[in-house]
Amino acid sequence: MNASPAVSPDILKIDAAAETERIAASIRDLVFNKLRRKGAVVGVSGGVDSAVVAFLCARALGPQRVLVLFTPEADSSPDSLRLGKMVAGSIGAPSVLENITPILQAAGCYERRDAAIRQVVPDYGPRHKCKMVLPDLLNGDRYPIYFMVVQSPNGETSQVRLTVEAYLGVLAATNLKQRTRKLVEYYYADLKHYAVAGTPNRLEYDQGFFVRYGDGAADLKPIAHLYKSQVYQLAAYLDVPPEVQSRVPTTDTYSLEQSQEEFYFSLPLEKMDLCLYGKNKGIAASELARMVGLPERQVERVYTLIDAKRKATRYLHMAPALVEQIPEV
Amino acid sequence: MCLIEQEIRSFIGENYLLAREDNLNNNDSFLEKGIFDSTGILELVSFVEHKYSVELEPDELVPENLDSIASLARFLQQKIAGQNAIPEMSLPAPSARSGL
């Protein structure tokens, strides 16, 4: 049986040229009229999302009204800065390099994280490497419980289930990275009277894959409505450097290379993209399963997990809660 | 309702249903009801490991074992029974027993 039109392989295809112009017009309006700022700061990580946002801001505001910011730290891959510079060079925008390692050291980020890891890996030290992972849904229907993968100085790798205390300790410490990056972004935004452009795509925005007041903080989020595969379509249209387009999406937060899939989504992003679209459009799991290449039961499980993540992360989107509304503001 | 089910229900009520009016049935899926976030799941696992002196293996962390009060209680009963059972290999041979 053929797939119905609703689940054809082209369901996420967009008119990249028209979408680029629509977003650029919106950025101009948001920055100049609504936010009343003179330009935009974009934190560029070497990944495709921030590259597309930087390209869109340059097209909307002019490259001289975009400040590209690099904020590497001790655990960042060297590729992040190299590819970030490639992006800034491609759009011809000014850029600033701020290594945030000293700030993080002063805040005890690495020490606190390592102390939390030692709760489950007692011999963990500065020469070890780590990453936090969820089970891969493609290898069976596992409960979403976090494990810590640790690599010893001699290259041996082990995996340990995290305790609540260790998990929260690692999370609290590593979230300092995203919050420090935002602190630096707003320093430059204040300095130049610019707005801060956030870089989440729809998967990240919908599923709460961001740190509250960290990478979740921004004055505008120009691609938050785009599925990841649509971001890639814009990247191709905008001529984002091919190496940036082909880079595997990473969190660039832990010392071991960590994909977004193993940290949060538990599924390859192209499959997650289609499942989120299917869920949003009310497509039955049985119909979507054929196109995604997953068993129906697994699509049903992903649909459930999408709702569970939405519920669990709803507060990330909330403005500070007030006991009483203040109508004057 | 068995004691383990009551204890799990009590743990969830005290920690996750504060000020909430959700009616949680024994067979309701924790994931579908949105009872736990990633921290809550770890707290649940930690609670049952300490309360019942069991250690959950990675391959046991599946929805069939964990995703409702009933399934978790059933899994724990089997796990505890398995731990308490005297392994067959260590039983004295019938001839030896008969000689007691």
Image: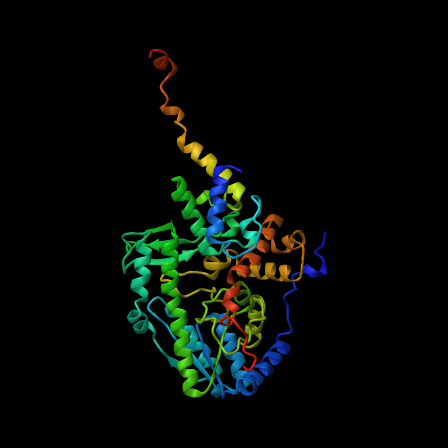
Residue depicted at 48% across the width and 87% down the height: A65
Nearer to me, A292 or A36: A36
> Residue B95, position in %: x, y?
37, 12
Q: Residue at x 56, y 58 (%)?
A: A306
Q: With respect to residue B63, does A28 lie above or below? A: below
Residue lying farthest to the front in this orientation: A324
Q: How is the image coloured?
A: rainbow
Placement of A306 over or under A220, stated as above or below: above
- Asked whether residue A146 appears in the rendered view, the answer is yes
Q: Quadrant of residue A130?
A: bottom left
Residue A326 on image: x %, y % = 54, 78
* Residue A147 drawn at (x, y percent): 41, 52
* Quadrant location, the C terminus of chain A: bottom right
Q: Residue furthest top?
A: B99
Between A306 and A250, the one nearer to me in the picture: A306
For residue A126, side relative to residue A282 (left or right): left
- Kindly tell me whether residue A241 is visible in this rendering: no
Measured from the top left, where is residue A129 in percent x and y? 33, 58
